[in-house]
Image (cartoon, rainbow, N blue to C red):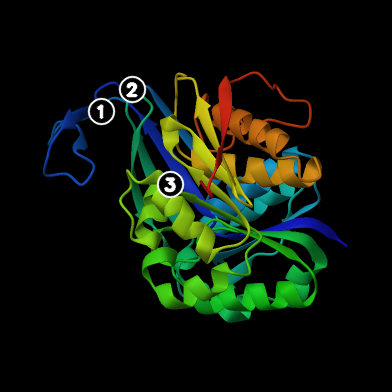
Amino acid sequence: MPYDIITIGSAFKDVYLFSKKFKVLKNVKMITGEMECFAFGTKIELEDMHVEIGGGAVNTAATFKRQGFKVGCLARIGKDSAGDDVRQYLKKHGINDLLAIDRKNKTAQSVVFLAPNGERTILVYRGAAHDFKTSDISPVITQAKWLYVTSLAGRTDVLKKIITQAKQKGVRVAFNPGKLDITKGRSALLLLLKKIDILIMNNEEAATLTGRPITDETGYVRKLRGLCPGILVITKGAQGSVVVLNGAMHRVIIKPLKAIDTTGAGDAFGSGFVAGYVRFKGDINKSIQLACNNSAGEVSQLGAKNGLIGLTGPWKKVSYSIKKVNLHK
C-alpha cells in the first residue's frame, strides 16, 4: 500500500504568545473555575512568540512521520497564505499532501495565550477546518493500512463515508473525536463507534458521551466498552490515562512533570499509542510506553510538535506505572 497511515482532520496556523504578565486567577463563574487574565488597556510585553502549523491532522501526522511511517495528511484549508504555509510544512517534513481546498472559508488559525504554569487559553477561528465535505473524502484513503481520524466538527456523514470506504478495503480506523463530534448527531455516532478499531478521547468526552459522571471512571468505561468493541484509550491529563482491551482496563498513572505547554498533549498521546500499536504489532505495554513518552516530550517544549519523539526515543521523559483491572468483576 502507498501509505502506512493517513491522518484526517484539521490543519491550523497557530500563533503562541508567552508573557509572565498573563495571570491565572480563580473564578467560580468560569466553566473551568479559573480564568487567564491581563490588564485591560495596556501594552503587554511578550517573553516569547512562536508560529507553527498545527491542528489534529497535522500534529498526529508529525508523530507518525517521526516514527518512520509513510504518512498522508487530509485536511481542509483555504486558498490563502496560511493554507500555503500548511502545504510548505507538510512538504518540508516529508508528509504527503492530500489537502482539500475551501474557496469560501479561510484556513483555520488560532492564538494561544500561554500562562507561566504551562496552561493556556486559545482563541480559535476554525474556518475551512469546520466545513469538511463528504466530497473531500476520496478513494485515496483506501490506499492506507490505517486511518487516524481527528475531529470532524460533528460531521457524522463524513465520518460514515470514511468508515464505509475503509471497511470495504480492510483499512483499520482509529478515531479521536472532538466535542462537536460527540454532541452533534450523537445517535449516528453511536452506531459508527461499533466499527472503530481504536477509540481515543479524554475523560470529559467519555463522560459526556456515556452520560456518566466524570468521577465514575469504571462506570463510563464499562458503558463505553458496550458502545465500542475496539481498543479504548481515555486520557485524563496529569492524572494519567486508561487503556481498555477486551475485558481488561490498564490504568496508567504518571508521575508529575513540569509542563511548558500542554497544547497538543492529547494528539501526542493518541497518535503515540497508535504508532506503538502498529510498530510493536499490538503490544499494549509498548504502545502505552510510546504514548506516555511522546506526550511528555510534547509538553516539555513550546508548540504542539517540537517535543515529539522519534524512532530512537528518548524513552525516559516520564515515569509511569500500569495497574491492570478486570472490568468483569
At label 1, the amino acid type is Phe
Q: At 65% from the left edge and 42% from the top edge, which residue is drawn? A: 273
At label 2, the amino acid type is Pro
| Residue 106 seen in render | no
Q: CA distance from mark 2 to mark 3?
A: 34 Å
Q: CA distance from mark 1 to mark 2?
A: 7 Å
Is mark 1 in CB contact (under 8 Å) with mark 2? yes
Q: Label 3: which residue?
A: 218
N-terminal of the pair, mark 2 or mark 3, is: 2
**Badge number at residue 22:** 1
N-terminal of the pair, mark 3 or mark 1, is: 1
Q: Label 2: how many residues lie within 10 Å, few (<14), some (14-19) or many (20+)? A: some
Q: At 42% from the left edge and 31% from the top edge, which residue is drawn? A: 239
176 shown above or below 118: below
| Residue 149 seen in render | yes
**Outermost residue, front direction?**
329
Measured as percent of width and height from the top left, residue 251 is found at 53, 35
Q: Nearer the viewer, residue 6 or 326?
A: 326
Q: Label 2: which residue?
A: 116
Q: CA distance from mark 3 to mark 1?
A: 37 Å
Task: Give the quarter of the figure containing the N terminus.
Answer: bottom right
**Badge number at residue 206:** none
